[in-house]
Amino acid sequence: MDSASADLMQFVQNRLPELCEAFAQTPLMQLRVTTAEGSVTLEKAGARASSLDAEASEPRRSPRSHDYLPDAEPGRAYTTVAADVVGIFHSAPDALELGAKVTPDRVLGYIEALKVRTPVKAGVEGRFVAQVAEDGQPVDFGETLFVIDTGPVEALPDEPPPSDAGTDEGAEPPRI
Amino acid sequence: MFNKVLIANRGEIALRIVRACKELGVKTVAIFSEADRNSLHVRMADESYCVGPPQSARSYLNIPNIISAAEVAGVDAIHPGYGFLSERETFAEICASHGFKFIGPPGPAIALMGDKASAKKRMEEAGVPVIPGSGIVESLEDAKAFCRTVGYPVLIKATAGGGGKGMRIVGREADLAAGLETASGEAQAAFGDGRVYVEKLLVHPRHIEVQVLADEFGHTIHVGERDCSVQKPGHQKLLEEAPAPRLPTEVREKLCWAAVRATRAAEYSNAGTLEFLVTDDGNFYFMEMNTRIQVEHPVTEVVYGIDLVRWQIRIAAGERLTVRQEDIKPRGHAIECRINAEDADKGFAPAAGKLGSVLLPGGPGIRVDTHIFSGAEVPPYYDSLLAKIIAYDRNRASAIARMRRALSETEIKGVMTTVPIHERILDSPSFAGANTHVTWLREEVLQPPAA
């Protein structure tokens, strides 16, 4: 086995289970993750399960977000907002509705560390897709907290996307 | 003397109290949260109890759990340290009602001095100078009249205040109306209380505070002053020294005696600190009283040769303060550098995490108060203080040289620390000349004027 595929196997074993669980908790139907080791695409049950470069395995552990970027609709770009300090994540008191417009200065949440509350700003303009981190959860440097759709805002339909993940009864409601 | 004391705190101050107790032959009981299981204060104490999950509100602020630990351990007294429950009157009273001596001032003194308005009123009555203030602003005309009396610039502050919210500096009368409106709006949004008052703004004052000790028989002394002007943005102290440099003897005398009068007026006992702002014309103004031991107490201890934490315990145990005012004489100079887990270049961004190797300084004239060790965790739930390095020597210049040497020996791997910013401070010519003030660090070190 060459080192690239060994890295991929390591990724599958170590990070994929968590990724699957985190994905299951979002309203998204499809998710593609690209890392240095390779790329993986996940689809929700009900849609056709598929894999590109690796096989998805069953989630085993509690969800912890990682650097994942959901696969956006064609022509749209999603971006993630990551933790820039180690600390405890807190949702903003005025949480956003799914699909709401965000401006770069919009405070999406806070990270509390060493008695300092650091605001987490969107940093980009777009539409709010998902909150990945849970209120009160310890987060690491670089951990994904939010996903934002940075596609052309004016091109979006006025209606927010449906909040339940299609017909999948097992899907959890989005956490916002 | 007590048989057993519970320490309702964590980190370096918990360790400091354990050490004082050991030297007095008093048994110690540590409390800890789930995040502090492997802490040094837990290891050093005779007994320890877990009082809850990592969040302070559920552990170090959890009064029922702490009182339960005290009951189970069978202690005589509880030392609150600083922060957490140390300045909560209700905690002092709950301790007393459960038969535990609270090692600190009486509840009513905590309540009196903890309320800005009542503290200020009592100080004025005792003849202690306070910053001229308007009282709650009822009308623009009243505010204008007040500002004309004290002169501009003025500072608008929220009654419910804190954290800089609802604060506005106004430099001239034309801007007063807009300033009041903005400050009141901010205060309403932040605290649900839009009431504001106006104070005279002191230009580049120094923060000088006076340590006091009072026993329960009315014997009150001061233990000199500390200069804590080197502060991070947001009024957080970073470096402290004793005695205050560049302070005329007659101002020092007046300041220290005002602190003694203030302590008596508050019907205070145990250790406390009166914080003042001092202007270059030699005027000083009472800011607030900290009714507890302070982080920077070691500079006073080494310069005056007095153990403040030991006296806290002895006074609470009902002993008389045997130190006389005339025995209080400074010897040499001491500087304390607070080593925090922070990145000064990123606005003192917090840097929690796991420590790598830790090497701390030593040698002549160096004291280090810390709870960290190689491989220890810095949990994100509590404050950023990792260690206090105290350097003392015959005079200020040699204490500075000694501190530089101590910082060069310090190695803390794994997180960003304030060691580099302290090195910059010590290298600054204006620090060497003691030309510091409360916004000096921000104005002259963090954002120095373009050359």
Image: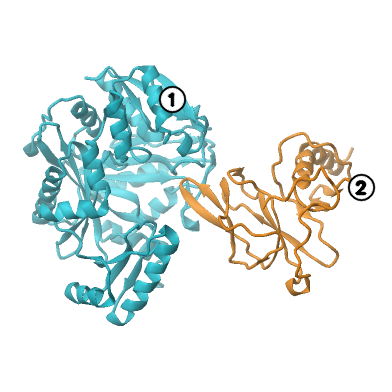
Chain colours: A orange, B cyan
For image coordinates 9% across by 36% down, the residue present is: B327
Residue at the bottom extreme of this rendering: B174
Mark 1 surroundings: few (<14), some (14-19) or many (≥20) residues within 10 A: many
Can residue B290 be seen by looking at this rendering? no
Q: x%, y% of residue A46?
A: 90, 47
Q: Position of residue A75 (x, y in %)?
A: 83, 67
Q: Which residue is mark 2?
A: A50
Q: Secondary structure beneath disc 1?
A: helix
**Relative to the observer, which residue lies in front, B274 or B41?**
B274
Amino acid type shown at disc 1: Val
Q: Tell me which chain the residue with mark 1 is part of.
A: B
Label 2 marks which chain's residue? A
Provide residue B380's location: percent of width, then percent of height. 51, 42
Left or right: residue B252 versus residue B50 is left
Residues at marks 2 and 1 touching, judged by CB atoms closer than 8 Å: no
What is the number of callouts on the image?
A: 2
Q: Which residue is mark 1?
A: B42
Q: Which element is circle 2 on?
A: loop
Tell me what residue is drawn at x 18 percent, y 29 percent. Answer: B315
On screen, residue B47 above or below B263: above
Residue B170: quarter of image: bottom left
Q: Quadrant of residue A4?
A: top right
Vertical order, B56 against B201 (above or below): above
The Cα–Cα distance between marks 2 and 1, rounded to whole angstroms, is 52 Å
Determine the image quadrant of residue A22: top right
The residue closer to the viewer here, B357 or B148, is B148
Question: Which dot, 2 or 1, sits closer to the camera?
Answer: 2
| Front in this rendered view, residue B145 or B29 | B145
Q: Quadrant of the N terminus of chain A?
A: top right
Relative to A81, residue B352 above or below: above
